[in-house]
Each structure stands twice: as C-alpha cells, then as structure tokens.
Image (tube, rainbow, N blue to C red):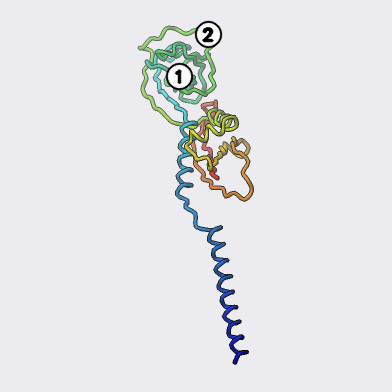
Amino acid sequence: MKIMHKKGMSHIEVILAFVLFISSIIAILYFFNFPKDNSNISTNLEDTYSKIRDNLSTDLFIYGVKINDNLAKNLSLNLSTNIKGYRVYAKDYLGNQINASITDNNTGVICLNTNNDLSNFVYIYLNKDITEDPVTGGCTNYEEDKYNISSMQKESLMSVNSALDLKNEYEQNYTALKSYFNLSKETNFGFELDINETDKIIAENNVPRGIEIYAKDYKLNLINDSIRNVLIANLKIKIW
C-alpha cells in the first residue's frame, strides 16, 4: 500500500508540473504578444499625413482671358488682386507658351509678349514655384477694352519644392518637427514621396531592428517648377 501511495503522489506531481509549465508558457506569450491597440497608430498616421499635406500644399490660380485685339504682340492686363510672392506662366489655348512677367505685384498687373500675334484666348497661371519665361521687351499700359477675364479657378496641389524643404527640416530639426506634428517622444515617423520610378524624396531616420513599422499610402496631385507637368505622386507615411 505504501508503494502504491508513493506512485499516486508522483502522478499528481507530474500533472501539477505540467499545468505549471503550460501556465508559464501562456503567461510569457501573453506578455510578449498581447493584443495591441492600433487606434493610436491609425490616428498618428492620419494626423501626420494631414500635417505633411499642409506643409506641401501650394495654391495654383488659373485665369482664362479672352483677347479682343488678337493682332497685338504684347499686352498688359490687370487681375485686380495682390499677387505678391507668386510667379506667372502663360500659354494660349493651343498650349503654346507666351512670355509673361508680373509688373505690379500689389494690383496684379501682368505683361504678355509674343513674337507672333496673341491668340484670342490665353491662360494665366500663378504659383509660387513655377518657372517663369519673362518678357524681354516692354509692355504697353493695360487697356481694359483689349481683354476680358472670363474665368478664374483655384487648385490646391502639392509642391516638389516644399517636399524638399520638409525633407531638409526633417534632417536638420527632427525633434522640433516631431513636436510640431504632435507626436509623442516614443513615436517616430518618416515619409517617402514617389514622383516616378526614379525620382523619390525620402526622409527617414534609422529604424532599430525588430521594431514594427506601420505605413499608409496616399495619392497626391503634384506640381513641379514647370506648370506643364502636374503629376499623380504617391506619399508613404511611416510610423514606428
């Protein structure tokens, strides 16, 4: 009987040891792989995207102008608005570029000049980043009977130049930029703007090995310094 009692106790000990072992494994798995709350990650991604989008945003104003004197080779027209800080680009309705310069920022006076006669309809583009093709000669004083401004529209696009500025700010003042984006000290971010297969603007610090990265892609209408190229680019936001 004593021998049987000892055998019974050893069976219980084995069972208890097994239960303790399984409990330990479950505890370890729980503490190292417990379900994560991704709501903050999603919020950080969207908030960071919103901040980057605001920093890259640039306004493009497009004026449609009917020319009443299409024999004129140069013409001054008045947009009657302050355009300080903007640059001008002009083309006719066929897409041919027209030399254009801003002669008065405060009132929005623009000079158009071409070697050929001005077409009966031209488009005026105003943006802070576009490359100008300025007028080489003079321009006559604007005469309102020679033109009519038939339309004006405003578009919000993303600027390549602003993306380069933000990349420089990221590399030079990362901590301040992260604070401006309202990210916690423990949270880091980076971004990548894919203009095409070869042209990319990347701002990303070294990510420690084993750190999980959360990323999301956004499509943007992008403008570079030539108004003729408005592209659809991909912006990838990363949070870790």
134, above or below 221, in the image: above
Task: Specify few, some or many for label 1: CA neighbours under 10 Å numbering under 14, 14-19, or 20 or more.
Answer: many
Residue name at image x 50 percent, y 18 percent: 98
| Residue under numbered circle 2 | 137
Q: Relative to residue 119, is residue 6 depicted above or below?
A: below
Label 1: state its secondary structure. loop
Q: Relative to the observer, which residue lies in front, 55 or 137?
A: 55
Could you tell me if the residues under marks 2 and 1 are in contact, i.e. CB atoms within 8 Å?
no
Residue 107 x %, y %: 39, 13
**Quadrant for the C terminus in the image:** top right
Q: Image quadrant of residue 119?
A: top left
Quadrant including the N terminus:
bottom right
Q: Amino acid at mark 2?
A: Gly
What is the number of the mark on residue 119? 1
Q: Nearer the viewer, residue 73 or 180?
A: 180
* Lower sequence index among marks 2 and 1: 1
Disc 1 marks a residue whose amino acid type is Ser
